[in-house]
Amino acid sequence: MRRACWWLLGAALVMGALSDRTPARAPLRVGPFRVLAVDLHVHTFPLSASTLAPWDVVLEARRQGLDAIAISGQNEAISGKVARWFSRLVGGPTVIASEEVHGPAFHLIAAGIDRTVSWRLSAEDAIDEIHRQGGIAIAAHPTAGAWPAFSRRALQDLDAAEVAQPVAFSPGNAKDVREFSRRTGAAAIGSSDWHGMGPVGLCRTYVFAQDDSAAAILAAIRSRQTVVVDRGRVFGNMILAQMAGDRLFDRGTPAEASAWGWLRIASGVCGVAGLLALALFSLPKESFRRDPPPARRKASAGA
Amino acid sequence: MPRWSRWLPKLWIAVRRPMAVALGIGCAASLMAHGTVTPRLALPAALYWSFVPLLEIAGLALVLRKEFSAEAIDDFFAGHGPWLLWLAAFATLWAFVPGPVAYARTGFPHVWYGLAMVAAAWSAWLDFAFFQRVARRSRIGAARDVLVQRLVCWPIGMIIFVAPAGWQTVASRLGL
């Protein structure tokens, strides 16, 4: 069992390394705009309930064909700054330093900020503070439970709201977030709310910006120049969506070339089998019997 | 006989299972994010997730005191089998099931967190057996050791994993 576990994990690592390729993608231009695939709600390890460190998420975002990401630590902004520094170092995707303002009544993505925005503020005050810092405020997974936290002014001041994100994969929540987005009239956002499960950019926003700088992306979102494609449905700026046409549908998580696809599957299967073998090998067998319990020891000594 | 030849086998006994746990977590992190076990993600993740076995060892050292040894670490980490089984199942979900299906139709998160509770209970039972049989504790002593070991390492682990949002949740509930 022990040997099988190491062979399986070794094979998974070798095949994983061989199939780990970043597909080349030509930048998409529509009229005067560069169309950028952006994930504006990404968490990292540590401090933010995720599995991968900021630098690993930056590399993974590039592999998933994202042009920009917002690293939005829960009530902290340091992870975003670390990721931004690393991405500049390696020429990775644009990183927008952000925070998820994780309050008891509402969650807000504060994208493009410098200092932490307190979770103790009301939604109105939090949005004001985000704007003071030059950032944009995005309502995160605004299901019906969060609606009372947003006053009329908060709804008007929001720059964007998530319409596609993992909570919206269940039909009830999908109805809620789309209704909220319709009420605000803010830019439509698709985000993966990434905590390590599934690919980064599982849900993404297509931002029609002048260039791929953080400033241009934030400006484009303020101007409602976003489109979200969620399982065949299109949200956001319909004029821009029509201009882009079917080309947006090809910009999701990258499809793998067939040979590398097989290697990927084989690496995944070997990895899972290796993990199972590791778990079974870890479970106690003889180890607890090396020292018998005192009662049994006495009995055996007597014999 | 050189001195290192005496402590090297002991060191290996002490680190082999903790390293296996860290590598298991790293591989699971890579599988969940990428669908494969790529060294680019699995090895760094194993390195920074080694805080889990390190905290577990620290908690064990505090509980066992003079009985703390390389063999004790090795035996204690047998109790991580249930967690690795859960991790293998969870990694399989995110590696092979499309995101929308995994989120909406597999009982996520409640079923999976429920299964994590089962793994936690099974692991606690194995550790209880460890303290009874290997550390020769009474039933009450073993139960106390399991509790103390977890009280030492779990809160620190949670601080590393989710401190800012965790503090907000606690503070909001307590009205602080």
Image (cartoon, coloured by chain):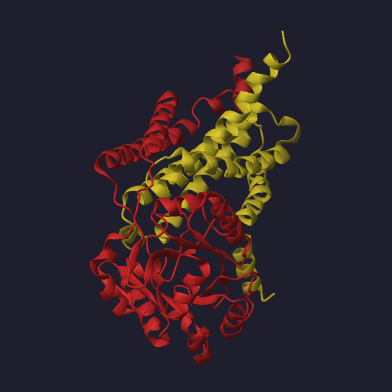
Foreground: A111 or B169?
A111
Instruction: Tell me residue B22's x, y (percent).
Output: 54, 39
Foreground: A144 or B45?
B45
Instruction: Tell me residue A185's x, y (percent).
Output: 40, 85
For the N terminus of chain A, the quadrant is top left
Q: Tell me: A290 left or right of A279.
A: right
A97 w.r.t. A175: above or below = above
Instruction: Tell me residue B2's x, y (percent).
Output: 72, 11
Residue drawn at x 73%, y 14% as measured from the top left: B3
Is residue B162 among the parts visible in the rendering? Answer: no
Task: Give the yellow chain's letter.
Answer: B
Q: Quadrant of residue B19?
A: top right
How many numbered badges does the structure rendering display? 0
Q: Tell me: A281 left or right of B56.
A: left
Task: Give the red chain's letter.
Answer: A
Is residue B69 among the parts visible in the rendering? Answer: yes
Q: Tell me: B4 left or right of A29.
A: right
A89 w.r.t. A192: above or below = above
The furthest residue to the front: A32
For the C terminus of chain A, the quadrant is top right
The furthest residue to the bottom: A152
Q: Quadrant of residue B174?
A: bottom right
The furthest residue to the top: B1
Instruction: Tell me residue A183's x, y (percent).
Output: 40, 87
Residue drawn at x 45%, y 36% as measured from the top left: A279
B138 w.r.t. A127: above or below = above
